[in-house]
Image (cartoon, rainbow, N blue to C red):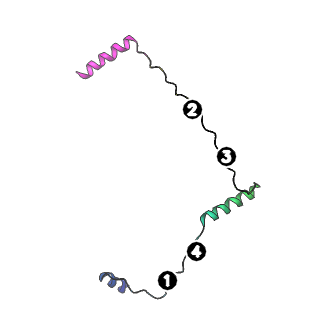
Amino acid sequence: MHEVIAAKAEHREPAPVAGEEEAPAQVVDLMAALEASVAKAKESRGEPGGPATVHEMPKPKKTAAKKTPAKKASSKETKKTAASRRRKSA
Protein backbone atom coordinates (compact mmCIF):
# COMPACT_ATOMS: atom_id res chain seq x y z
CA MET A 1 0.00 0.00 0.00
CA HIS A 2 2.91 2.34 0.75
CA GLU A 3 4.22 1.79 -2.78
CA VAL A 4 0.90 2.93 -4.27
CA ILE A 5 0.84 6.09 -2.14
CA ALA A 6 4.47 6.91 -3.00
CA ALA A 7 3.80 6.40 -6.72
CA LYS A 8 0.77 8.69 -6.62
CA ALA A 9 2.79 11.37 -4.81
CA GLU A 10 5.43 11.21 -7.56
CA HIS A 11 2.75 11.30 -10.31
CA ARG A 12 3.61 7.89 -11.72
CA GLU A 13 1.83 4.55 -12.06
CA PRO A 14 2.45 2.09 -9.22
CA ALA A 15 4.22 -1.16 -10.08
CA PRO A 16 1.75 -3.98 -10.82
CA VAL A 17 1.46 -6.58 -8.10
CA ALA A 18 1.79 -10.22 -9.22
CA GLY A 19 -1.42 -12.25 -9.06
CA GLU A 20 -3.76 -9.24 -9.16
CA GLU A 21 -4.98 -9.81 -12.70
CA GLU A 22 -8.56 -11.07 -12.84
CA ALA A 23 -10.06 -13.37 -15.44
CA PRO A 24 -12.44 -11.62 -17.85
CA ALA A 25 -16.10 -11.86 -16.91
CA GLN A 26 -18.52 -13.91 -18.99
CA VAL A 27 -20.52 -11.74 -21.41
CA VAL A 28 -24.24 -12.52 -21.51
CA ASP A 29 -26.33 -11.83 -24.61
CA LEU A 30 -29.38 -10.24 -23.00
CA MET A 31 -31.56 -10.36 -26.12
CA ALA A 32 -30.91 -14.07 -26.60
CA ALA A 33 -31.72 -14.69 -22.94
CA LEU A 34 -34.94 -12.69 -23.22
CA GLU A 35 -36.04 -14.47 -26.39
CA ALA A 36 -35.36 -17.85 -24.78
CA SER A 37 -37.35 -16.85 -21.70
CA VAL A 38 -40.32 -15.70 -23.77
CA ALA A 39 -40.26 -18.87 -25.86
CA LYS A 40 -40.16 -20.99 -22.69
CA ALA A 41 -43.11 -19.07 -21.18
CA LYS A 42 -45.17 -19.44 -24.36
CA GLU A 43 -44.36 -23.13 -24.51
CA SER A 44 -45.52 -23.64 -20.91
CA ARG A 45 -48.84 -21.92 -21.71
CA GLY A 46 -49.34 -24.04 -24.82
CA GLU A 47 -49.06 -21.14 -27.27
CA PRO A 48 -47.39 -21.57 -30.64
CA GLY A 49 -43.72 -20.71 -30.41
CA GLY A 50 -43.22 -19.09 -33.81
CA PRO A 51 -42.28 -15.48 -34.39
CA ALA A 52 -44.85 -12.84 -33.54
CA THR A 53 -47.15 -11.53 -36.23
CA VAL A 54 -47.25 -7.81 -36.84
CA HIS A 55 -50.48 -6.11 -37.86
CA GLU A 56 -50.80 -2.56 -39.10
CA MET A 57 -52.96 -0.41 -36.87
CA PRO A 58 -55.93 1.33 -38.53
CA LYS A 59 -55.49 5.06 -38.95
CA PRO A 60 -57.73 7.14 -36.67
CA LYS A 61 -60.48 9.13 -38.31
CA LYS A 62 -60.05 12.87 -38.10
CA THR A 63 -63.03 14.69 -36.69
CA ALA A 64 -63.47 18.43 -36.48
CA ALA A 65 -63.52 19.75 -32.95
CA LYS A 66 -66.87 21.24 -32.09
CA LYS A 67 -66.74 24.64 -30.44
CA THR A 68 -69.38 25.48 -27.91
CA PRO A 69 -70.80 28.97 -28.27
CA ALA A 70 -69.92 31.42 -25.51
CA LYS A 71 -72.65 32.01 -22.97
CA LYS A 72 -74.10 35.50 -23.26
CA ALA A 73 -74.21 37.37 -20.01
CA SER A 74 -77.47 38.91 -18.94
CA SER A 75 -77.67 42.67 -18.59
CA LYS A 76 -77.63 42.36 -14.76
CA GLU A 77 -74.40 40.34 -14.85
CA THR A 78 -72.82 42.85 -17.22
CA LYS A 79 -73.65 45.75 -14.89
CA LYS A 80 -72.30 43.86 -11.85
CA THR A 81 -68.98 43.00 -13.50
CA ALA A 82 -68.54 46.55 -14.79
CA ALA A 83 -69.18 47.93 -11.29
CA SER A 84 -66.74 45.49 -9.68
CA ARG A 85 -64.06 46.42 -12.20
CA ARG A 86 -64.47 50.09 -11.36
CA ARG A 87 -64.09 49.36 -7.62
CA LYS A 88 -60.96 47.23 -8.11
CA SER A 89 -59.15 49.76 -10.29
CA ALA A 90 -59.88 52.75 -8.04
Between the C-alphas of marks 2 and 4, the distance is 53 Å
**Which residue sits furthest right?**
46
Q: Where's residue 66, x and y in %?
A: 52, 25
Quarter occupied by residue 87: top left
Between the C-alphas of marks 2 and 1, the distance is 65 Å
Question: What residue is rendered at 36% in x and 86% in y?
Answer: 3
Between the C-alphas of marks 4 and 1, the distance is 15 Å
Determine contact: label 2, label 1, CB under 8 Å.
Answer: no
Question: What residue is rendered at 68% in x and 63% in y?
Answer: 36
In-front residue for pair 67/85: 67
In-front residue for pair 11/52: 52
- Numbered circle sitting on residue 26: 4
According to the picture, the residue beneath numbered tag 1 turns out to be: 21
Could you tell me which secondary element the residue under label 2 belongs to? loop
Sequence-first disc among 4 and 1: 1
- Numbered circle sitting on residue 62: 2
